[in-house]
Image: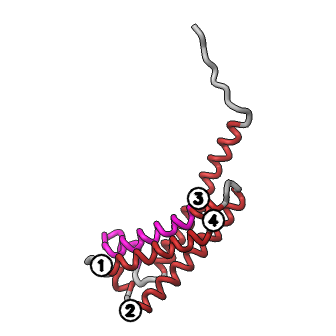
Amino acid sequence: MTSTTLALESGYWNHVGHGVGAIVLYALIGLVLLLLGFQAIDSTTPGPLRKMIGTGNPNAVIIAAAGMVSMALIIVLAIYSAGGRLAEGLVATAIYGVVGIIVQVVAMRLLEMALGLRIGDLLKSPTYHVQALLVAAAHLSIGFVVAIAIL
């Protein structure tokens, strides 16, 4: 009977540990940015967004979900742009994420003024309105623009 030994390259576990550490750190920064992004949407609209989502308000859910996906796009491209340089990637992700949040808030206010939408009223409405899709599309569009600008 013969036995086979699996030989790992020297430094393998160091490499794996570095990767796991990067995942944890990026996940923490990503989570903080997503929470900040949600808080920014919540604080710039009338009424507690968290409560509107909790009660199943369709417009609030659609708009908040689009804002979260938009932030995730920005975070992913910021991580990708780091090219494996962990420290630079973490700093860039935090900076780009905060800038993305600011740009989204400003863009939503401009959209509201330009189109005469009342996003606060839309969020509070318990019935679905197609305008929620326009606001969601604007969130996603801004996220794509900011994400691509990072590259």
Query: Which residue corresponds to mark 4?
Result: 93
Residue 116 shows which numbered tag?
Answer: 2
Q: CA distance from mark 3 to mark 1?
A: 34 Å
Question: Dot 1: within a 10 Å radius of its alpha carbon, few (fewer than 14), some, or many (20 or more) residues?
Answer: few
Kind of residue sitting beneath label 2: Gly
From the viewer's perspective, is residue 103 above or below residue 148?
below
Residue 65 lies in the magenta stretch: yes
Q: CA distance from mark 1 to mark 4?
A: 33 Å
From the viewer's perspective, is residue 70 above or below residue 134?
above
Question: Dot 3: within a 10 Å radius of its alpha carbon, few (fewer than 14), some, or many (20 or more) residues?
Answer: few
Q: Nearer the viewer, residue 68 or 131?
A: 131
Query: Which residue corresponds to mark 3?
Result: 28
Q: Earlier in the sequence, mark 2 or mark 1?
A: 2
Q: Secondary structure at mark 1?
A: loop
Q: Are marks 1 and 4 in contact (CB under 8 Å)?
A: no
Residue most extreme to the top: 1
Q: Nearer the viewer, residue 38 or 97?
A: 97
